[in-house]
Image (cartoon, helix red, strand yellow):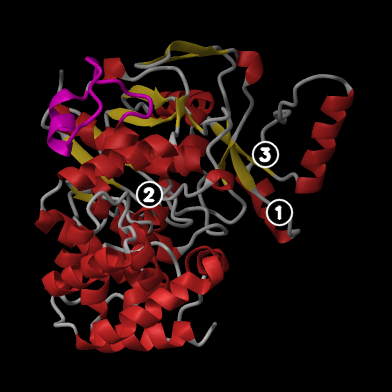
Amino acid sequence: MDTIKTRFAPSPTGWLHVGGARTALFNYLLAKLTGGTFLLRIEDTDRARHDESAVEKIIEDLRWLGIEWDEGVEVGGDNGPYRQSERLEIYTEHIGRLLDAGLAYYAFETPEELDAMRTAARAEKRNFRYPRPDPLPTAADADKARAEDKPVVVRFKIPKRDVTIRDEVFGEVTVAAAEQDDFIIAKDDGWPTYHLANVVDDALMGVNFVCRGQEFLSQTWRHVLLREAFGFAEPKYAHLPLIMDMAGRKLSKRDGAVEVHAFRTAGYLPEVLVNFIALLGWNPGGNIEQLTMDGLRDMFSVDRIGKANAKFDREKLLAFNTDAAAAADENRLLAGFRDYLSLNETPIPGDDDSLLLHLLRINKGFRTFADIPAKCGVLFAADDAYDYDEKAVKKVLAKGDGSGYAMLEHLKAKLADCEWTEDAIQALVEGVCAEKSVGMGKVAQPIRVAVTGTTVSPAIYDTLMILGREKTLARIDRCLLMR
């Protein structure tokens, strides 16, 4: 295979969507497959939807995932600028070439006039196609229209023939001439449309393999015709299957997070998310599911991208993360946990590595990092800053004529005098179990509810060691006042 140059060209409107992350990943892997180049370009010509803060968000998301680019924004290269908002002169020059060659023309309809045309087409039960004027408007006509405060756009003059796209995933896709119309390449505000800017940039930046979502396949005929008009070489195409939810609907926020950053703040490991999204529409074969970035670079191939829509199985992603966290070494988990804490407000101090490692050890088996503050965060809160779960109080403390409260009274004096070590606390609890002829739950659970407000915490010895004697006794006193 010839050396490949791919690109990821997001429009900055917010955090990176998992669908965009998959596109970026596949383009990265395609480039690495042949020792090629992966380029990052920012497509920000839609000034109405542009969010400048989103540029940094996208870059941050890509780097968190471990997807690095060889050329483009922040990296540089020979084909910049890499933000379309800085390339207006280039687009204007190329639009002028098409106008001069009679391959494009000015148009002046208002949105209301265009809507009226579409309404008339629907009433006549025909597809709307923009009616090309004859003769074509001149530059003088455009100047006059501007002076009259009319919208002036530039439309591409299609050659009125069928267009066949040769796609590496979907095969040959033909768009009949009857389904095409003269589309806009320059908007009234002077900015190029996506189609024009995308084609010009890909050609001038040397991109020879375009990999993107299937939703763009129906638009690709426009790009084929524009490239022909400019005399640009045609790249290879690979359109990726759609990503759906488990009900077969387009993936959306109604089911939960759809942005990379949301999974990061929820406590997922980036390598797990990369592994998971790599399998959305691509199959490595051999029933292999656990893949590292290195493994993906070695195994990835276009011929294993499928046509069927991919399903975003959140339970599977959670299972992947649970397994990866259980297998990861402590240094990896510590780095991930610190990143999670830096993005979330929790009572857990994020600058004490020995404490964080201890929390990781006593929470082994967690699904995401979010499970740790959910289970342990209360241990770092103020003694009066947590509520008591009503069901836990009834079941553990009040049931049996307040047997749980009575157990707390019995334990309080013993804990006050106990040496505060894990072994000593364990011996104390086991001694009370023997003394009262009860199981561990009858002793440990009243303590747990008293000091956390719930029946969920780390092992009781770990819980009390983290709290310390003073806080433990203060919380038991607070609990006993509820009787």
Amino acid tagged 2 = Ile
Q: Earlier in the sequence, mark 3 or mark 1?
A: 3
Label for residue 144?
Answer: 1
Q: Is residue 299 visible?
A: yes
Q: Name the residue that disc number 3 marks.
A: 137
Q: Earlier in the sequence, mark 3 or mark 2?
A: 2
- Tell me where residue 229 sits by quadrant: top left
> Magenta segment: does it hold 368?
no
Quadrant location of the C terminus? bottom right
Amino acid tagged 3 = Pro
Secondary structure beneath label 1:
helix
**Magenta stretch in the rendered image:** 279-300
Q: Earlier in the sequence, mark 1 or mark 2?
A: 2
Above/below status of 137 relative to 469: above
Judge from the rendering whether residue 117 lies leftward or rightward of residue 457; answer left or right.
Answer: right
Q: Name the residue that disc number 2 marks.
A: 90
Q: Position of residue 178 (x, y in %)?
A: 66, 15
Which of 299/365 is in front?
365
Which of 210/188 is in front?
210
Separation (CA) of disc 1 from disc 2: 25 Å
Residue occupying image coordinates x 12% and y 70%:
423
Residue occupying image coordinates x 44% and y 34%:
313
Secondary structure beneath label 3:
loop
Residue occupying image coordinates x 64% and y 18%:
179
* Neighbour tally class for label 1: few under 14, some 14-19, many 20 plus, Cα within 10 Å: few
- Secondary structure mostly seen in magenta is loop
